[in-house]
Amino acid sequence: MAFQAVPDCAKVLVHFASGPLTASIGLWFAQQNFTLEGMQTLRDEIDTAFLVPVVAPLSENVNITGITIYDMRSATGPKLVHVYDPVLSGNEQSTPTSFGNAACISFYGEGRGQANQGRVYVPGIGEAQADQTDIQTATLGFLVDAFEGLRDTPPTGWTWSIVSRVLNGVPRAVGVYTPVLTVTSRNPRWTFQRRRVPRP
């Protein structure tokens, strides 16, 4: 897929690991006319605004190892890579389930349709926080709270957003964004995220 610009937006990839296994989730943030310094603020503040709370209900054997931030306004925009040392680890004393198992967190903007919907798949939930089919309600609640915190108190100057790059099945000339208003976990059942090559 050719690069598609998204005005005023940066994309953050959050990198998880459990032993040799890795996974990432992608989040979009918007700020008009942001600078490299603004990207650095996003890098510096996203850990306390989001990463520390979101990793807390996960297994102690699951870590957030780093983040990558892309300036999505152009194909030649800057990229920031930040490796956490020490890593950010989960708090639950439990062996993680298969890294293919994930909790699906959904979020919505003001309008209707797919252009105003997003979701991420959070890996690393421990066996003690779920059974063979369902994730515990309390664990899902912690995850939803973490994402709501990202909506309510995002990194300074940024707005957590949903990006749409397709309209009626046809790629847009440029992506468009809308702020996230609602966060939910619609189903306690495990979801299964197919492994994909990460793209900016």
Image: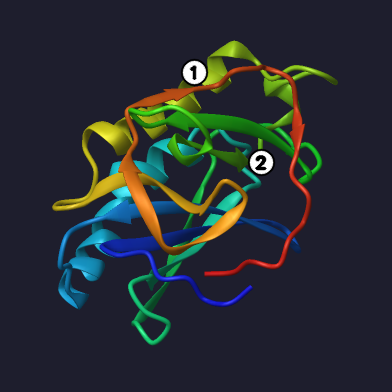
Q: Which residue is mark 2?
A: 124
**Who's the residue at 78% across and 36% down the image?**
97
**Who's the residue at 42% across and 82% down the image?**
75
The scheme the figure's colours follow is: rainbow
The answer to which of marks 1 and 2 sits earlier in the sequence is 2
Give left or right: position of 38 versus 192.
left
Dot 2: element: loop
Report the label total: 2
Residue sitting nearer the eye, 20 or 13: 13
Question: Marks 1 and 2, Cα distance to the nearest angstrom?
Answer: 15 Å
Seen in the picture, residue 18 relative to 117 is either above or below; the reply is below
**Mark number, residue 141:** 1
> Measured from the top left, where is residue 109 in percent x and y?
37, 32
Name the residue type under label 1: Gly
> Measured from the top left, where is residue 166 in percent x and y?
53, 53
**Who's the residue at 66% across and 46% down the image?**
61
> For residue 138, what is the image quadrant?
top right
